[in-house]
Image (cartoon, coloured by chain):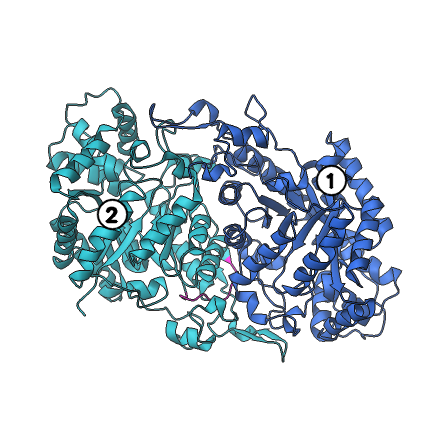
Chain colours: A cyan, B blue
Amino acid sequence: MSKQLHLNAFLMGVGHHEAAWRHPRTRAHNLLSVEHFQNLGRIAERGRLDSVFFADELAISPRIEHNAQAIFEPITLLTAIATVTERIGLIATASTGYHSPYTLARSFASLEQISGGRAGWNIVTSAREAEAANFGLDGIPDHTGRYRRADEFVDVATALWDSWDDDAVVLDPETATFADPDRVHTIDHDGDLFRVRGPLNVPRSPQGRPVLVQAGSSETGKDFAARYAEAIFTAQRTVEEGVAFYRDVKARAVAYGRSADEIKILPGIVPYIGPTEAAAQELEQEFTDLITPEFSLRQLSEVLGVDLTEHALDAPLPPLPPIEQIHGNKSRHQLIKDLAAQESLTVRRLIAKLGGGRGHRTFAGTAEQVADNLQEWFEAGAADGFNVMPPYLPGGLEDFVTQVVPILQRRGLFRTEYTGETLRDHYGLVRPAGRFSSTAVTTRDFRTSTGGQRRWMCASR
Amino acid sequence: MSKQLHLNAFLMGVGHHEAAWRHPRTRAHNLLSVEHFQNLGRIAERGRLDSVFFADELAISPRIEHNAQAIFEPITLLTAIATVTERIGLIATASTGYHSPYTLARSFASLEQISGGRAGWNIVTSAREAEAANFGLDGIPDHTGRYRRADEFVDVATALWDSWDDDAVVLDPETATFADPDRVHTIDHDGDLFRVRGPLNVPRSPQGRPVLVQAGSSETGKDFAARYAEAIFTAQRTVEEGVAFYRDVKARAVAYGRSADEIKILPGIVPYIGPTEAAAQELEQEFTDLITPEFSLRQLSEVLGVDLTEHALDAPLPPLPPIEQIHGNKSRHQLIKDLAAQESLTVRRLIAKLGGGRGHRTFAGTAEQVADNLQEWFEAGAADGFNVMPPYLPGGLEDFVTQVVPILQRRGLFRTEYTGETLRDHYGLVRPAGRFSSTAVTTRDFRTSTGGQRRWMCASR
């Protein structure tokens, strides 16, 4: 079989378009409904997608009067989705800035156990002032400091996930042995920011560790991803830029002694799918027409760090501060600046472009055209797969799964059935050996050693 | 209808008896199975119980070689139970010592939303050295310091839960209004230990706030409970002691300006149920016979802070340090000391007594005798209900629900159907008004204002 692409469904409320909750194709109340999100998990699984994913922040959305607010915490929400699905991967965003490694590693380990090895962690460092203020800080730590904390945090978390050897749980009623204490290790981490003795109070999980995901595209972010990430969500606007990013990150990973295959690169795409190209474009226009420019100007002002609220909508962007002066999300800032400059966009057209996917690429066309476009990027070496960001939900995901996925399957580019059970299986990632263990255990060995059942969790049923 | 009692099922692994996982009535692998716990939630709901509850610690169990270890984090586990049940309350233990108020308040708010208003929080301060070492501390903070942190933590968490008025979410697509910003409040907490701006990034929940539960029985613990708790889990050995505790805590609550009804007192009971009293006692003896004395001695040494591992099993306890010198769980220490002294127990018999419920009262008898005993305590004014701690699971819970509950129902002491939908409804607790809101909203008003649906979450279905 030829090389296969990977598909993640990036789920956000009732869609990625900022006005999605106001379009007749959605129901605004679904924002508050766990059943809506469980349904999205089922649709993604029906399409044999690799995973679903939720972004997250630790403060309310800015401009709460217009901006639909995510109300669920991702790990609990994905737990609710785990219980109504069997295979789909479950990726939660969580911040290294405002958690403790022990409690966060444990929550992910619990999701791993509940889902039978389907958890992923999208590692973010949290760059909003509003988040810092909820955790006793007067401002956000600088970019370098945030990544230094993320480095140590990930090291501690992976040590905790490794702190029980795969065969540590003995569970022998005859000898009254629950666990072999020689196979449960303290981690004795004593670093610059954290001191953690361990072990974790959860045995090693089906995947060994959750899949590590990252989305930083700054130099520091790419370097961090090259060292730790097993999947990268990224915003790339052209296939050329995509190829350059892909090569850059893979080369960095190789320089860190990893194989290029150990890191899957998934650029975002916001697909508007219609029976004809014109119908798809009309659909996109319907969403654009729902944008409230005054609200979007305030959003854009916040992201760029420049007050645009008095700026004329039909003029180009004013000069922006250099990237060095940005302490928040550097790569998003750069992307918007480049987009406006390269396409000579007025502020009004920039707002329309950003409304769909906050800087991610939008594409309007027939299902065939969407599939062609994905295949083009994949075969050009710009992507190992895609971060699919439906502009409205559930319809946009349903259309992708029922119309685009079958085309990719017919072309031999995408699985027609799951061939594995864990998120690592789906992405073709190896199960890491525990760092304290003397023997490597593959997912298959692991399942066999724990009873040969489909899911380790259910070995006793 | 006469006054009704309340029943909480305290769930622990495959049972409260320390050797439960080795008894033929359990399957040890259920310790690792989320389906086992979902099944327990369903059984409790079938019995119309008020709630299920999980204890928690932030370190591995001591003596991991013998001691069956809880592997799930309670909030994620209760989320998994929430998705397969409709009414049963879901109470998770979480520590004020090692969380941030913002992230913990948010996780509970998410469980509230996912469960449609069934969440409760058992507030603990974490008294084990092993936990402190997982969070960078050289030892546990002293008793007073732990409760001071708990005080401020609860204040911040409740402010965050109140930070959205009940009617803050407008969700009007026509006017592009998601929320009314005048009804979403910063909390601007600036205290000794925490600085938190808020608001929380979850709207006010169906119950307003999760039900607050506490189990501390030290003087500081009782005072804390009297101020904040809406339900108390407590270990009381005799009906006289139960009455004294009940009156003490209710009086303290009244002294803090609360009504005695606002705080429900639930002593623990570990019931062994058999077709005859002799059969029930034999069953209890089977569990006692599975105790490993050398393991239990090490456990007891740790709890009491005295090395008993060389102590003769058939001698009484040696002199113990005075309670003032105990920095960990003071009330558990006192309870064990009293138990040994009042009943002149040898260490062997003390271990047998403690094996079933770690100091909680055990009771072996027919279903009728168990019901009689509960009725006696209830009518004597020692309890508003009970914290039922099945020695083995699922069988011990199943027997309680199918044999004891129907007797209590026939006597008019326990509901035959749920009359409400939230955990507050079950316990007869009022829905608290938001502290920043000018108008109090009852649960009923709240549901009506959000569409009159059974569950607010599903208003759009």
Tell me if A363 is positioned left or right of B110 in this view.
left
**Amino acid type at mark 1:** Asp
Q: Which residue is mark 1?
A: B223
- The quadrant of the rendering that contains the C terminus of chain B is top left
Residue B333, percent from left and from top: 76, 57
User: Which chain does tag 2 point to?
Assistant: A
Tell me if I can see residue B418 in this picture.
Answer: yes
Q: Could you tell me which secondary element the residue under label 2 belongs to?
A: helix
Above or below for A43 versus A26: below
Residue A289, percent from left and from top: 22, 28
Does the magenta segment cover residue A197? Answer: yes
Tell me if A188 is positioned left or right of A41 in this view.
right
Binning the other alpha carbons within 10 Å of mark 2 as few (below 14), some (14 to 19) or many (20 upward) gives some
Above or below for B307 versus A80: below
Binning the other alpha carbons within 10 Å of mark 1 as few (below 14), some (14 to 19) or many (20 upward) gives some
Q: Could you tell me which secondary element the residue under label 1 belongs to?
A: helix
Q: Which residues are magenta?
A: A196-208
User: Which chain does tag 1 point to?
Assistant: B
**Amino acid type at mark 2:** Asp
Q: Main secondary structure of the magenta part?
A: loop
Q: Residue furthest front?
A: B410
Residue B415, percent from left and from top: 70, 45
Above or below for B354 versus B372: below
Viewer-closest of A54 and B155: A54
Residues tagged by mark 1 and mark 2 found on one chain of the structure: no
Above or below for B24 versus B379: below
Q: Who's the residue at 51% across and 32% down the image?
A: B452
Does the magenta segment cover residue B392? Answer: no
- Identify the disc placed on residue A399: 2
